[in-house]
Structure formats: structure tokens, C-alpha cells
Amino acid sequence: GIQVEQSPPDLILQEGANSTLRCNFSDSVNNLQWFHQNPWGQLINLFYIPSGTKQNGRLSATTVATERYSLLYISSSQTTDSGVYFCAVYNTDKLIFGTGTRLQVFP
Amino acid sequence: KAGVTQTPRYLIKTRGQQVTLSCSPISGHRSVSWYQQTPGQGLQFLFEYFSETQRNKGNFPGRFSGRQFSNSRSEMNVSTLELGDSALYLCASSPGQRLEQYFGPGTRLTVT
């Protein structure tokens, strides 16, 4: 089946720093979503982005489906950005999750 | 619109028992999917229901089952619980297949 890999697995930042999270997938996908999982386990939708670039405040995402990767950019990080970031891709009509990037932002 | 709701939020069961979890989707959404999250296996797809029919199933044993009602609410059932079934169970709803999914807060199941 399709493999979805995220990098880096862990990221530690100081408040105000910028970061780029990467999601690579091994096969063609119908769609792609980025989520932020907060400490209570809730998955929060960030982007639904099958291709192209989208921006929402300090966050933006780019998916290049033909090259099988997506990037999530976080600018001017805040302590509330801490948590685990997942990308998930639609393949064979199922949502397959990546392994996640754990982000810790310190004041 | 109200978000996806799941009940109960926390549950403790004993090995061998069975459990039923409930999920109410966002109003107007007809697709409901279930996922299991464990530290070792990550987030894994269990099954998807649309208009009361199971459309997709993940690689889980038959002890895991589900159903969807005419109002799109869904339940999942796990019979003969094992210690390894301890996990966060997440439900997601979507207007249709391959469209954006929205997740509920999850049910944290502990099997002792």
C-alpha cells in the first residue's frame, strides 16, 4: 500500500522561529489534508490541499502532486503551535495518515 | 454548525468485554469514518459508512464492526476486548467520499 512519510519526526523551536514540515507519499493520491493534533487528541483541520498553495494566517501549505510531496510552513511560531502535525492522503478511497511531526515551541 | 461529537469521551473496560462507541456527524454530512490511534501503529483507518452502507474497511479483525443509521449517526462495536485495543478512537464526517474530513474529539478506551 501507499507509504506516507513525514519529516522531521521531531522539531524544537523558540517562539518566533519559522519552520517547514514535509510530507512525502509513494503513490498518486486523490486529495491531501494537513491536521494539527492538540494535547487532548483533537485533530484540527489546517488545510485540504490536493494541489497548489494555500495560506491561512501564519500557516501555508503547498502540494506538488506530480512529485508526490506536500509542505507545511509555519511562520513566527507560538507556544500554542505545539503538538503533532499530520498529513493524510486519500488513496484507494481511504485516508492514510503519515507518521507525524512533533513540534515543541518554547517561549 | 455543531462539530462532530463522540460519546463517551473516556471508557475503561476489562478484557473479554465488548464496547460500543457513538459518533454524530456534522449536520448534512453523510459519510462517517472511524480511525484507531495507538502509540505503536499511529492513526489507522477502520471503516467508512455512507448512507447506511459500509463502503470501505481497513485491515482489522472481525471483532471490530460498525453501522450507520438513517440520520447518519454511526456506532462502532468491539467485541471480546484485548489489551491491544486500548487506543484513542476517532470518528470523522464528510459530505462525501474523498472530500474534506472533520474529526470529533475521540473516545479514549482503556482495556485492563
Image (cartoon, rainbow, N blue to C red):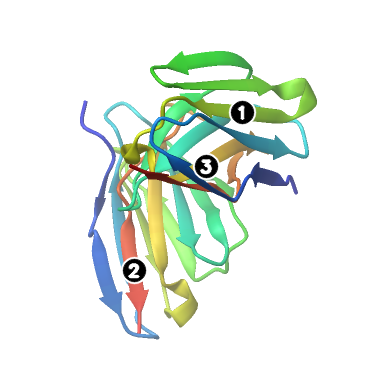
Q: CA distance from mark 1 to mark 2?
A: 33 Å
Q: CA distance from mark 3 to mark 1?
A: 11 Å
Letter of the chain that mark 3 sits on in the rendering: A
Q: Secondary structure at mark 2?
A: strand
Q: Secondary structure at mark 1?
A: strand
Letter of the chain that mark 1 sits on in the rendering: A
Tag nearer the camera, 2 or 3: 3
Density class for disc 2 (Cα within 10 Å; few <14, some 14-19, many ≥20) is some
Q: Quadrant of the N terminus of chain B?
A: top left
Please name whichever residue, A57 or A88, is drawn nearer the observer in this view of the structure.
Answer: A57
Residue B83 x, y percent position in the rendering: 45, 81
- Which comes before the other along the chain, label 3 or label 1? 1
Residue A83 x, y percent position in the rendering: 41, 47
For label 1, the residue is A71
Q: Are marks 2 and 3 on the same chain?
A: no
Residue A35 x, y percent position in the rendering: 46, 37
Please name whichever residue, A91 or B19, is drawn nearer the observer in this view of the structure.
Answer: A91
Q: Secondary structure at mark 3?
A: strand
**CB under 8 Å between discs 1 and 2:** no
Q: Quadrant of the C terminus of chain B?
A: bottom left
Q: Label for residue B109?
A: 2
Q: B47 left or right of B17?
A: right
Please, what is the three-letter code of the amino acid marked with disc 3? Phe
Please name whichever residue, A74 or B69, is drawn nearer the observer in this view of the structure.
Answer: A74
**CB under 8 Å between discs 2 and 3:** no
Please name whichever residue, B10 or A35, is drawn nearer the observer in this view of the structure.
Answer: A35
Residue under the point 52% across and 42% down = A86
For label 3, the residue is A86
Q: CA distance from mark 2 to mark 3?
A: 22 Å
Residue under the point 49% across and 42% down = A85
Please, what is the three-letter code of the amino acid marked with disc 1? Leu
